[in-house]
Image: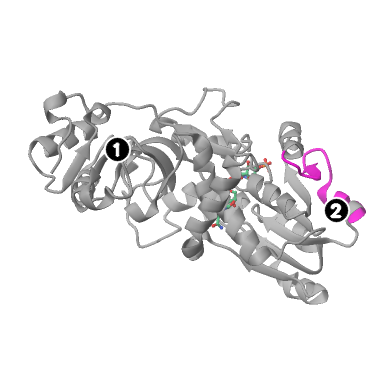
Amino acid sequence: MSSNCGLNLKIHSSSLTQFEASVTEGFPFCMSRFVGVNASDINYSAGRYDPSVKTPFDAGFEGVGEVVALGLSASAAFMVGQAVAYMAPGSFAEYTVVPARVAIPVPGLKPEYLTLLVSGTTAYISLKELGGLSEGKKVLVTAAAGGTGQFAVQLAKKAKCHVIGTCSSAEKSAFLKSVGCDRPINYNTEHMSTVLRQEYPQGVDVVYESVGGAMFDLAVDALATRGRLIVIGFVSGYQTPTGLSPVKAGTLPAKLLKKSASVQGFFLNHYLPEFRGAMDHLLKMYAGGELVCEVDTGGLSAEGRFTGLESVFRAVDYMYMRKNTGKIVVELPPSVNNLSYHAIQLVKGGMFENLITVNMSKVWNIGPKNAIQNK
Ligand SMILES: NC(=O)c1ccc[n+]([C@@H]2O[C@H](COP(=O)([O-])OP(=O)(O)OC[C@H]3O[C@@H](n4cnc5c(N)ncnc54)[C@H](OP(=O)(O)O)[C@@H]3O)[C@@H](O)[C@H]2O)c1
């Protein structure tokens, strides 16, 4: 990502056109208050997700925001002032037009709801569909104290599994203990393969594997007979030119055969039909006090907390310095900006035939006369 990719711009013409077209079609228009940082933001901005996409394109996968304008067809499901969580490309933006089908009403403007979107649902759906979890199974989670790892740990505990989680510091280890992880392994102070060999001689039944490279190799070696490893990611390779981290692929077929073990990939985008149900389930768990949604807004960052879109770059670096515990979230304070100005011009100019409500106090203070339009 660079400062000319649209991140630092308050608005560019495509946003305005999208805003104009979409709001008139009735999609909620949101003021973003929290945006989520993901390990794959750098894969996306490097063009690895869709090589056909040419720069400049909008980055960011998810946010939580407040509905500030609403078209007719969205009015049955949404209200101005409502908090919504959304997974939508281009979410690193102060204002976002969110397709109604992906805007999920949430009880309030809290970053915890954001943690459930990409990170929570990835853990929930992958473990449900591929994990085969049941009581007593041994589950190894790598990057266990991170955005998605924290949910894999807790969901495996809910399924009455024995959970082992890898991490890089004593603080993360303490966090893992606090969310029920039976055996945190701080790989900077303990030798992982020794711990696994000595404490789990029969191997582990399921691995939720996010790190790749040497960690993947260790996890394959630690698989039990009929064990299964779910490839969630390979973050250790994302900063390399290829985005990959080398593994001992040559010996993999023999290792799997000898244990009747399996390795299977999981990519959330291929499970979108399950997304909404997963969100509903996780929201209920959180509301019932059954789930910790740990948020990291840069408490350990030397330059201070992540506030404003300009801090997205710092937040990504923070993740790659392995400092985060929980989900990295950037807060966007409510602000008046250029898009607000353009929104007013469009509203004033009668661009929105089907626009039923605009909360102008959140967009721009142009006086009560123009504040609400009902058609
Ligand atoms: N398949 C999917 O659909 C899907 C969806 C979401 C996320 N993911 C994957 O899940 C993984 C975690 O993503 P996330 O966004 O939740 O990130 P995260 O876990 O919040 O942060 C990444 C963590 O990875 C660990 N790590 C180990 N080696 C690393 C390295 N060389 N460089 C950077 N970090 C390293 C660090 O924890 P420690 O310091 O404790 O080791 C770091 O905090 C990634 O592989 C991501 O691609 C996949």
Residue at 90% in and 52% down: 199
Q: Which segment did they paint magenta?
A: 179-198
Please provide percent x and percent y for residue 345.
Answer: 12, 35
Given the image, on which type of amino acid does mark 2 rest?
Answer: Leu
**How is colour applied across the structure in the image?**
one colour
| Marks 2 and 1, how far apart at CA | 53 Å
- Secondary structure, mark 2, is helix
> Residue 294: x and y, percent?
61, 36
Tell me which amino acid carries mark 1: Val
At which x and y percent is residue 289?
63, 39
Is 43 magenta? The answer is no
Along the horizontal axis of the image, is 240 left or right of 263?
left
Quadrant holding the C terminus: top left
Image quarter of residue 363: top left
From the viewer's perspective, tell me whether residue 243 is left or right of residue 336: right
**Residue at point 32%, 45% (across, down):** 78
Q: What count of labels does the image hold?
A: 2
> Disc 1 on helix, strand or loop?
loop
Which residue is disc 2 drawn over? 196
Which is nearer the eye, 80 or 241? 80
Q: Is residue 373 above or below residue 17?
A: above
The N terminus - image quarter: top left
Count neighbours of disc 2 (C-alpha within 10 A) and say few if under 14, some if 14 to 19, many if 20 or more: many
Label 1 near label 2: C-beta < 8 Å? Answer: no
Towards the viewer: 289 or 266: 289
**Residue 193 within the segment the image draws in magenta:** yes
Residue identifier under label 1: 80
Which is closer to the viewer, label 2 or label 1?
A: 1
* Residue 72 badge: none
